[in-house]
Image (tube, rainbow, N blue to C red):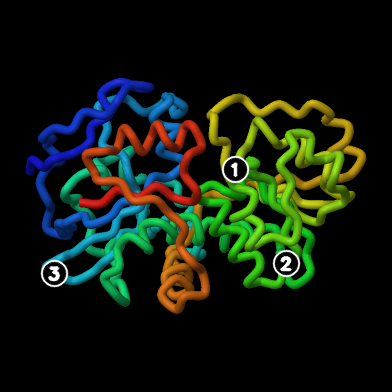
Amino acid sequence: MRVLAAVLREFNKPFNIEEFDVGEPGPNDVIVRVKAEGICGRDLVIWRGGFKNLKPPLVLGHEIFGEVDGRPVGVFGAITDGTCPYCKAGKENLCLNLQFFGEGRPGGYAEAVIAPKNNVFELPDSDYVKYAAAICPLATAIHASRLGNVGPRTRVLVTGAGGGVGIHTIQYLKYLGAYVISITSPTKADFVARYSDEVITDREFSRKVKDVDVVLEIVGAATINESLRALRREGVLVLIGNTEGEEIKLARPALTVMREHRIVGSAAYTRREVLEAVDLVHKGVIKPVYRVYSFRDVNQAYDDLMNQRVLGRAVLTF
């Protein structure tokens, strides 16, 4: 099946808009007509060549929302086998054979996607853009907050708070009743302040904030050492992302040793958390924050993201 797609043929180079063969649907597959697709930070890392096991050509995108036979649907962003010990324990985000759309198979930067039937779920309405903007970031926040045991009055520091994951994360943390300290750029500070108890724009932010209970580390290498300096004894740093794809180095490992920090990786989210995110967005508890781009303007979207000109999520529409 040939569809119009944004094809990554070389890392760190513009996408080509072209017809691309995405294969043929099998007996357990459906064809999803894509209406909106979110651009994830994971996509940016892939675009830079940060996943050494991936080779172009690639059709990226795992935040897929559209229609099957005219019905509004979303697509769970990763295909799992359902049989491994983690899947059976309800932790399919840790599936031994997990395969993301946009990596092991063509993803949502295209007019249509072939998806297994059991990866497709009904949406409560057809406002595809809001779901493409918020569901992946919000489900990520739900999962990471549980790993950090965040609850009312927990002091939580969030790096990259004005980005696609960050702006939805801080909203969710306020919903939980946490005390939110946001790290962001000066240009995004005023908006981020709507969902924060404190906003810090300094690179050396540990000079201004101390003894937080939990860090939700979205940025990675560029901020993790400042985050650890701000983390209290026995505090938890949940590592959500590493946006630049650079090697993470601990500048002062003795600090983490002596404070008995826990550094916990956060692997995306479960299907249950995706559906929880859909419910929160549908009910208006979380307000999606995004900028819309036509599918053909994907290269402009990437340029804006790379230069931090996007508040929240960039969403491609078809």
Residue plotted at (54% across, 30% down): 244
**View extreme (left): residue:** 1
Residue at x 51%, y 60% (from the top left corner): 138
Q: Earlier in the sequence, mark 2 or mark 1?
A: 2
Query: In the picture shown, does residue 130 fall above or below 251?
Result: below
| Circle 3: element type | loop
Q: Dot 3 corresponds to which residue?
A: 70
Question: Quick check: 3 above or below 204?
Answer: below
Type of amino acid under label 1: Thr
**Front in this rendered view, residue 176 or 248:** 176
Residues packed near mark 3 inside 10 Å, few (<14), some (14 to 19) or many (20 plus): few
Contact check, label 3 and label 2, Cβ < 8 Å = no
Q: Is residue 220 left or right of residue 208?
A: left
Distance between the Cα atoms at labels 2 and 1?
Answer: 24 Å
Give the spatial CA distance, label 3 vs label 2.
Answer: 40 Å
- Mark 1 surroundings: few (<14), some (14-19) or many (≥20) residues within 10 A: few
Image quarter (top left, top right, bottom left or bottom right) of the N terminus: top left
Q: Secondary structure at mark 1?
A: helix
Please determine whether, in this image, residue 87 is positioned above or below residue 200.
below
Q: What amino acid is labelled 2 in the image?
A: Ala
Looking at the picture, tell me which residue is in the foreground, 99 or 275.
Answer: 275
Sequence order check: which comes first, mark 1 or mark 3? 3
Q: Are marks 2 and 1 in contact (CB under 8 Å)?
A: no
Q: Quadrant of residue 58?
A: top left
What residue is at 42 percent from the left and 36 percent from the top? Answer: 304
What is the x, y in percent for residue 298?
29, 38
CA–CA distance in space, label 1 to label 3: 40 Å
Q: Amino acid at mark 3?
A: Gly
Q: Which mark is residue 178?
A: 2
Mark 1 or 3, closer to the camera: 1
Coordinates of residue 125 in the picture (x, y in percent): 29, 75
